[in-house]
Image (tube, grey):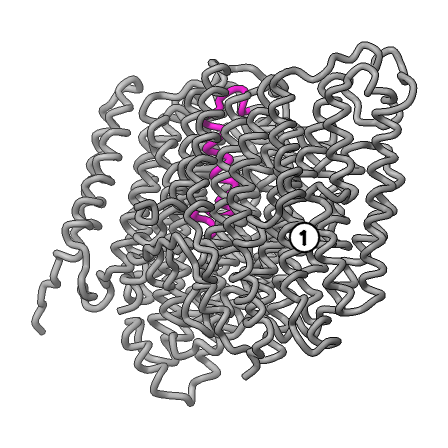
Amino acid sequence: MNFVAPDFMPVLPEIFVLTMTCLILVIDVFLEQRQRHITYGLAQITLLGAALLTVLTYAQAPVTTMFGHYIKDAMGDLLKLFIYLSAAAVFLYSRDYLRQRNLFKGEYYVLGLFGVLGMMIMVSAHSLLSVYLGLELLSLSLYALVATDRDSPVASEAAMKYFVLGSLASGMLLYGMSMIYGATGSIDLQVVADAVSQQSRDHLVLVFGLVFLVVGLAFKLGAVPFHMWVPDVYQGAPTSVTLYIGSAPKLAAFALMMRILVDGLGTLQGDWQQMLIILAMLSIGLGNLVAIAQTNIKRMLAYSTISHVGFLLLGILSGTPEGYAASMFYTIVYVLMAVGAFGVIIMLSRSGFEAENIDDFKGLNDRSPWLAFLMMMIMMSMAGVPFLVGFYAKWVVLQAVVDIGLVWLALFGVVFSVIGAFYYLRVVKCIYFDKPEQSATIELSRDTEIVISANGLILVVLGLYPTGLMALCAAALLN
Amino acid sequence: MLSELPLLSLVIWFPILGGIAVLFVGDESPARAKALALTVSILSFLFSIPLFSHFDATTAAMQFQEFVPWIPAFSVNYHLGVDGFSMPLILLTAFMTVVVVIAGWEVIQYRIAQYMAAFLIMEGLMIGVFAALDALLFYVFFEAMLIPMFLIIGIWGGPRRVYATIKFFLYTFLGSVFMLIALIYMYNQANSFEILDFHKLPLSMTEQVLIFFAFLLGFAVKVPMWPVHTWLPDAHVEAPTGGSVILAAITLKIGGYGFLRFALPITPDAAAMLDWLVITMSLVAVVYIGLVALIQQDMKKLIAYSSIAHMGFVTLGFFIVFGIERSTGSLSGAAMGIEGGMVQMVSHGFISGALFLCVGVLYDRMHSRQIKDYGGVANTMPIFAAFMVLFGMANSGLPGTSGFVGEFMVILSSFKASFWIAFLASFTLILGAAYTLWLIKRVIFGEIGNAHVAALQDVNTREIIMLSLLAAAVLLVGVWPDPLTAVMHASVDNLLQHITASKLL
C-alpha cells in the first residue's frame, strides 16, 4: 500500500499557529514576570502571521486535503480572518486587566492560541472526526481559561459547570455522529452527503442521529433549551475570558452548523429546519425576556447572546444560500459588537474593582464621553437600530426568512427584538441619563484606545456602507 | 446649474457633519460650539431654499433626484428626490432647526455642545426621511432618528424623563418593525426597494390589508393617532423645550407624510375599504382628545393634546378622499382634503412649535408649567403676551392665521363626503378655541397671580427673534397660502390617480 503525502499547503495557517503556539509555550517558561509582554507580543505576531498566510492563500475554489478531512474554501478563510481579528482584539483589551489582577501569565495566551487553532480546524473541518477534534481542542482550552483565576470560587464553579455540560454536549454530538456513520458508512462529509441524498431506507436512523447532532450543536451555540451554561459561565469567568468566549467561538460554531447540517446533511433540511425553528423561537423569546431582569451586565449580555444566536439560526434554517450568507453576516457583525461590548466592560474595571453591574455604567458620559459614545453605538447596534450595522444583520436574516414564506416567524423575531431593545436602552440610560456614582478616571493605554475606537466606529462605517462585507459573505457562500 | 448639485445630499449630510463637528468642539468651549451650531443650522436652511425656488410645480415627477447604488445585493439604492409633499416639509425642518438652536442658546447649561449636535444630526436624519425614495433608505432614516431624540429627552428632560423617553422609543420602534416586514415582503414581490415601484406593484386584497395595517401601525404611532397616542403627552412634558418643538413640528409630520408616500398609494384598495377606521380614529382624536385637552393643568400637556387633535385633522383630510368618491362619484374636492391636510401639517409645525417655545419662555423664568402658578402675565410681559395671544389665536383657527387655512379646507372637503363627518370635525373650531383661549385667559390675562409673576422680566432680544420668525411664518401662510398649495397641486393630482386606480390583481 502506497502512502501519498497529502498537500500541506492549504493547511499552512494551522501549521503555523500550532508551531508558534508550541514555541511560545517554551519561550514563556524562560521569561520573567516583567518580560511577560514578550509572550503577548508573540501571540499577536502569531495571529498576524496566520492572517497574512490566510489572505495570501485566500481560496478561490474549495480544495480538500488530508484525505478529505480538511477543506479550504472562501467561507472558511473569511471566518478565520475574523477569528484572528477578534482574538487579537481580545488579547489587547484584556492585557491591562490581566496585569492588574496578577493573571498576566503565558497560559492565557497559549490556551487562547490553542483555542484559535481549534476554531480554525472546526471552520475547515470536512469530516466528522476533524469537526470533533477541533471542537474539543477549543472546548478544553476554554474550560481551562475559565478556571485560570483559581482563587475565585465563582470562576471555579463556572468552569466546572461548563466542563460538565460541555462534556455532555460532546457526548451527544459523538453519539449522533456514530448514528450518521452507521447509516452512511463514512465520516467524510462529502461521502455522507452523497449517501444521504441517495438512500432513503435508513432515514429513521439518520434523523435519530440528526437529533443528537442538533442537540450537541445547540449546546455549543448556547441555544435555548440548551443554554443553561451560558449565563453562569459568562458571569463567573474573569471578564477577559468572557470576552474570549463571547466572541470568536460563535464564528466557529456557525461554521460547525454549516459543515454538519448544510454540507453533510443538506438533504435532510426539511427535518432540521423544524428543529431549528423551535430552537430559534425559544432562544429569541427567552433570551430577550430574561435579559430584562438582569442587573449584572455580563449576565445580561449572556442572555442577549442567546437571543442573537436565535437570530443567527433564522438565516441557517431558511436553507437558501442567501440565508446562509445572511447568517454569516449576522455572526460576523455579532462578534464585532460582542468584542466591543465586553471590551468596554473590561476597560471600566481597574485594580480592585470589577465593572460588572449595569449600575457601574452610570454617568459614563461624564467620566469619558468618548467611551460612552462607543458603548452607546454598540448597544444601539445590538438593538438593531439603523445606521448601525446591527440593523442590517437583522434585516438580511429577516429577509431570508420572509423569502421562504415564514412571515410569521419574522414577525415573531421583530416583536421580540423590540422587547430586547429595552435592556439595551437601559444601558444607554445609565450611561447618559444618570449621574456618576464614582469619579475614578478611566485610564486607557494608547493602543487600547485606538482599537476600541476602531471597534466602535466600524459599526457605524459598516452601517453606512454594509455592501462590502455583505458581498464577501455572499461570495463565500453563493458559489 | 443648481439642479446639477447634489442639493438633497447636501441638506441631509451638511447638518449631520456639522453636528459631529460641534461634538468635537466640545463642551469645554460652549460659546464656539453654539456659534458653530447656529452657523450650520442657518447654512442648511439657506441650502434648502433652492429646493423651493427651483422647484417645478407643474410636474408630479420627483425632482432633484440622486441615484447611487448602495446595497446592490438587495437592489437597495441611495435614491433621493422630492415632490410637492416632501419639499415643504424639508423646508419646515430646516427652518425649525434654526429656531430650536436659538431657543436653546442660554437655556441649556449642561453639555450644550452635545445638545446642539443632537439637534443638527436629528435635522439631517429627518430631511433624509422626507427625501428618501428607496423604502429601505427611508426606514433607515426613520429609525435612526430615534437615537438623537431618545438622548434629547433623556439627557435634558424633566424629572420623569427616563420613563418618557423609553416609552417614546419603544412605542415608535414597535410601530415601525411591522412596517419593515411589510417592506421586505413587497421587495420579494417587486424585486426592488424603490418606493415608486411599490406604487405600481399589484397586490391582492389580503396582502393589501395586512400591509396597510403594518403601515397604519407604524405611522399612527408617529402621528400619533388615538389610541396609540399615549407616548406623546409624556414625551412632550418631559422633553426640553427644543425637543418638544422638534417633536411637535417635524416628527409628527413624518407620520402624516408616511400615509401620503406609502399607505395611500401602495395599498389604495385596502385604504378605501378601511377608510372608516382611520376617519373614526381621526374624529375621536378631534373630539375626545380636544375634550381631554380642556381639562389639562399642565401647559405643555395641554398643547400636546391639542397637537393630537390637530393631527387628527391631517389624517381626516387624507382619508376623506374615498368618502368623497363614494358619495359624489367624482373626485372634485378630494384634492382639497389632501392639500388641506398638508397645509395643516406645515401650519401646525409653526404653531405648535411656537406654543411650546412660549411655554419654554415662561418655564425658564418660573420653573413651573402648571397653569395655576400663572395669571396676569400680560401685566409684566406685554410683548410676550402679544406673541402668545397671536399663537393661541392661530391654534384655535382664527382666519388670517395659518391655522385657519388647513382646517377650513379639510372641513369643506369633508362636507362633500358626509355632513356628519364635517359636523364632528367642526367641533375642533369650538374645542380648539375653548382650550386655547381658556389657557390664554388663565395664564396671560387677569390680575397678577402671585409675587413670582409680578417679578417676571419680559422677553429679551433672542426670544423676540425666535418668536417673530414663527409669527411671520404663521401670518404669511395664513394670509397668502397660495405658494404653499401651488407646489402641491401636481403631486396631489398624481396621488389621486394612484389612489383611485385599483391595484387588485
Q: Would you say A121 lies left or right of B438 here?
A: left
Task: Measuring from the top left, give residue B247's x and y in whole percent.
Answer: 64, 40
Task: Measuring from the top left, give residue B258's x and y in whole percent.
Answer: 58, 57
The answer to if A381 sits in the magenta stretch is: yes
Q: Residue furthest bottom?
A: A201
Up/down of A432 relative to A437, above or below: below
Residue toward you, B128 or A437 = B128
Up/down of A46 relative to B485, above or below: above
Residue displayed at 58% across by 41% down: A424
Residue displayed at 51% across by 64% down: B183
**Placement of the C terminus of chain B among the 4 image quadrants:** bottom right
Quarter occupied by residue A16: top left
Q: Would you say B174 lies left or right of B371 here?
A: left
The amino acid on which the numbered mark 1 sits, given as a three-letter code, is Val
Task: Measuring from the top left, give residue A227's x and y in whole percent.
Answer: 56, 53
Question: Does residue A231 appear anywhere in the picture?
Answer: yes
Residue toward you, B249 or A1 = B249
Question: Does residue A171 appear anywhere in the picture?
Answer: no
State the SS at label 1: helix
Q: Would you say A322 lies left or right of A305 here?
A: left
Read off the residue under disc 1: B221
How dense is the environment of label 1, judged by Cα within 10 Å: few (below 14), some, or many (20 and up)?
many
Q: Which residues are magenta?
A: A364-391
- Count the marks: 1
Task: Measuring from the top left, give residue B269's x and y in whole percent.
Answer: 63, 75
Residue displayed at 62% across by 16% down: B461
Q: Disc 1: which chain?
A: B
The answer to if B436 sits in the magenta stretch is: no
